[in-house]
């Protein structure tokens, strides 16, 4: 009876501590959070997990304790803005640190009875840090690759448009109708900046946000057009170079396919050999019984 009372007291104490912690860090209850996330998922405005919501709230409270280098902070802030992650650099870094810390703490009990698994959890904590912290950089890198894949078509459109009109704003607006989602989003921002400010500054901001050398060449030609230069030959040569780069990339992708097939073929061969080894081993062990 005493043990049952101690168990109930522990459960109630833990529940009370949980609710007090949620109130302290301004985190809604689990039921409220699930309903809010379900509403966001149904409207298509979010796809977060409940653990990420709580972890972000705690990271926001602890982020003032973290001091970042100004250069790294500015670079990370730009990366988060491009990746569409609505967190400050301090909060994002603290969230990555807490993810790794929780993973490491989960492996501490294993050191008492299974040290090897404890070391594996420690390695998993390090991997958790890198995967969480560099997630934004990976998103930006993938986004840049998708934009660069569309830049040759973008350059062709500009080349064709310069034959009849040198209005840069009109060229960008006309291509926006057929642009992909990522490049289209950047064009929307650039067109809005051009309509409300300086054209050259808007194009330079466009170049800095994407961070692509191919886009830098296109922006250089557009700035020359704004200054009154005839850039038709420049874009003609640029389109030729981009098509060469695109063909080389396609050849590289095609060259990777046989290597991938070879890897899977080796795996199949290993499985077949393993089956024969197992069958022969069983037969040999069975025949040895007749000798003894």
Image: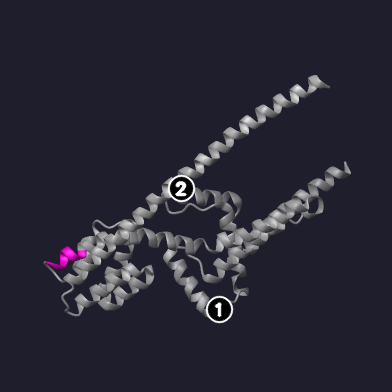
The correct choice, above or below, for 171 with respect to 251 in the image is: below
Horizontally, residue 221 falls left or right of residue 54, namely left
Q: Main secondary structure of the magenta part?
A: helix
Chain part drawn in magenta: 158-163
Mark linked to residue 163: none
- Measured as percent of width and height from the top left, residue 109 is found at 77, 54
* Residue at image point 73% right, 51% down: 117
Residue 68, given in percent of the width and then of the height, sits at 57, 76
Write the residue at 61% across / 63% down: 58
287 relative to 182, above or below: above
Q: Quadrant of residue 1?
A: top right
Q: Position of residue 44 (x, y in %)?
A: 42, 50
Whether residue 171 sits left or right of residue 1 in the image: it is left
The numbered mark at residue 69 is 1
- How far apart in space, not on screen, are marks 2 and 1 (Cα)? 43 Å
Residue at x 15%, y 68% (from the top left corner) = 162
12 magenta-colored: no
In this view, the residue farthest toward the left is 164
Element at badge 2? Answer: helix
């Amino acid at each position: 009876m005493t043990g049952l009372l101690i168990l109930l007291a522990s459960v109630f104490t833990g529940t009370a501590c949980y609710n007090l912690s949620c109130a302290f860090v301004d985190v809604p209850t689990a039921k409220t959070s699930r309903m809010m996330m379900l509403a966001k998922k149904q409207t298509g405005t979010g796809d977060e997990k409940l653990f990420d919501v709580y972890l972000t709230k705690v990271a926001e409270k602890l982020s003032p304790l973290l001091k970042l280098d100004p250069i790294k902070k500015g670079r990370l802030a730009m990366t988060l803005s491009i990746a569409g992650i609505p967190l400050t650099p301090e909060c994002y870094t603290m969230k990555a640190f807490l993810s790794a810390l929780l993973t490491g703490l989960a492996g501490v009990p294993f050191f008492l009875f299974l040290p090897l698994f404890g070391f594996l959890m420690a390695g998993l904590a390090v991997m958790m840090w890198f995967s969480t912290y560099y997630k934004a950089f990976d998103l930006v890198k993938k986004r840049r690759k998708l934009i660069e894949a569309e830049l040759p078509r973008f350059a062709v459109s500009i080349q064709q448009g310069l034959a009849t009109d040198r209005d840069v704003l009109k060229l960008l607006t006309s291509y926006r109708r057929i642009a992909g989602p990522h490049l289209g989003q950047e064009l929307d921002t650039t067109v809005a900046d051009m309509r409300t400010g300086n054209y050259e500054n808007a194009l330079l901001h466009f170049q800095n946000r994407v961070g692509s050398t191919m886009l830098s060449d296109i922006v250089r030609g557009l700035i020359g057009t704004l200054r009154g230069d005839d850039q038709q030959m420049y874009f003609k040569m640029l389109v030729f170079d981009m098509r060469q780069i695109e063909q080389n990339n396609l050849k590289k992708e095609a060259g990777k396919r046989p290597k991938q097939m070879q890897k899977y073929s080796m795996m199949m061969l290993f499985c077949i050999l393993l089956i024969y080894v197992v069958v022969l081993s069983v037969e040999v062990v069975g025949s040895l019984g007749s000798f003894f």
